[in-house]
């Protein structure tokens, strides 16, 4: 699904409805069913708060985030299944369990194995039926207990910060390097430096984020580094972050990369985002968004060296 200013019809109506329910668009906008300026601004606001590129266009990632924002905790039973349930209700469940001391992994809005174990442990400790299903009775107890806790970051944040504090040696580490575009030369240069210094490389398929994240997760990568191009001259290094959680390891690696790249790539920033590749990978991950391919290809060797140095410093 891709919608842009000027489009009209049922798809735009559905977009406006979801933006309205999420609180980003008044119900009585002047140009209903037309992708008007109000709709575009609402999309920008939603993208900004959701950690997505604020393009004002409703692309696949934006639509998916809007669909997930539709769910509030308690609207539907939550349980481990395949494919995994996703949504803001799953995020809220993870956030509450983490604050109560039940480690469900990082807060990513995906109902996986760690969340299933944490939910079962919570139900056992709370004297509830241990069925691994978060239904209304479980939600009621969760909300009651959460009102008795403080507003700390929760065990997920503490564990992630501790892992980032101690770091990991580069020798023997599993490093997954992926790309979305035409940066084969850059990837090969980085892979060569990593292999020479004892890292174990994980080969990833080019293209879709789900394929890369699935492979990196399945093969137990310790860190993910991805590259993509952009028509803009400004570059960005992104790590996973949402309002209730951020990857401390991803943030520290992104900051190190920015320091090493600032003399190679002008106008580069670090930003926490909710991009699919950062959300779906289970290890610290960064996505390096570079400028136009032709401009950056000439700097492939220097960019690869800077990123290698950042990885070496991040993993002493």
Image: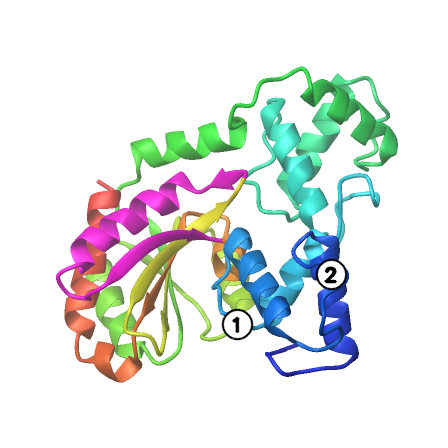
> Front-most of 28 and 87?
28
Instruction: Inspect the magenta stretch and tell me whether residue 38 lies in it.
Output: no
At 28% from the left edge and 73% from the top edge, which residue is drawn?
233
At 81% from the left edge and 37% from the top edge, which residue is drawn?
133
- The residue wearing badge 1 is 208
Q: Position of residue 144 (x, y in %)?
A: 76, 20
> Front-most of 137 and 44?
44
Q: Position of residue 86 (x, y in %)?
A: 69, 52
Tag in front: 1 or 2: 2
Circle 1: is it few (<14), some (14-19), or many (20+) Cα within 10 Å? few
Q: Residue 18: which numbered mark, if any? A: 2
Q: In this view of the protein, can residue 129 be seen by the observer?
A: yes
Instruction: Inspect the magenta stretch and tell me whether residue 271 lies in it.
Output: yes
Label 1 – label 2 distance at C-alpha: 26 Å
> Front-most of 117 and 37?
37
Q: In this view of the protein, can residue 111 be seen by the observer?
A: no
At 52% from the left edge and 32% from the top edge, which residue is drawn?
156
Residue 17 is left or right of residue 279, and the answer is right
Establish if 51 lies above or below 53: above
- Report the quarter where the C terminus lies: top left
At 44% from the left edge and 35% from the top edge, which residue is drawn?
160
């Amino acid at each position: 699904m891709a919608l842009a200013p000027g489009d009209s019809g049922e798809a735009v109506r559905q977009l406006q409805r979801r933006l309205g329910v999420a609180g980003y668009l008044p119900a009585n906008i002047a140009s209903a069913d037309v992708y008007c300026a109000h709709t575009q601004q609402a999309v920008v606001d939603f993208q900004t708060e959701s950690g997505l590129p604020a393009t004002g266009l409703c692309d696949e990632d934006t639509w998916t985030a809007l669909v997930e924002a539709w769910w509030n905790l308690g609207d539907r039973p939550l349980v481990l299944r395949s494919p995994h349930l996703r949504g803001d209700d799953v995020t809220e469940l993870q956030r509450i369990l983490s604050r109560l001391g039940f480690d469900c992994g990082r807060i990513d809005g995906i109902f996986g194995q760690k969340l299933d174990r944490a939910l079962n442990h919570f139900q056992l400790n709370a004297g509830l039926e241990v069925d691994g299903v978060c239904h209304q009775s479980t939600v009621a107890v969760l909300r009651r207990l959460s009102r008795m806790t403080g507003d700390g970051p929760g065990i997920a944040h503490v564990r992630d910060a501790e892992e980032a504090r101690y770091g990991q040696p580069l020798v023997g580490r599993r490093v997954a390097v992926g790309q979305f575009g035409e940066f084969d030369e850059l990837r090969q240069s980085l892979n060569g430096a990593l292999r020479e210094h004892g890292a174990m490389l994980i080969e990833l398929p080019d293209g879709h984020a789900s394929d890369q994240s699935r492979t990196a997760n399945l093969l137990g990568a310790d860190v993910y580094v991805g590259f993509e191009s952009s028509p803009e001259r400004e570059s960005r290094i992104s790590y996973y972050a949402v309002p209730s959680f951020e990857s401390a390891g991803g943030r520290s690696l992104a900051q190190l990369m920015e320091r090493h790249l600032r003399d190679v790539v002008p106008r580069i920033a670090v930003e926490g985002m909710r991009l699919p590749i950062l959300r779906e990978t289970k290890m610290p991950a960064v996505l390096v968004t570079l400028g136009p391919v032709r401009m950056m290809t000439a700097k492939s060797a220097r960019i690869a060296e800077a990123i290698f140095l950042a990885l070496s410093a991040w993993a002493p």
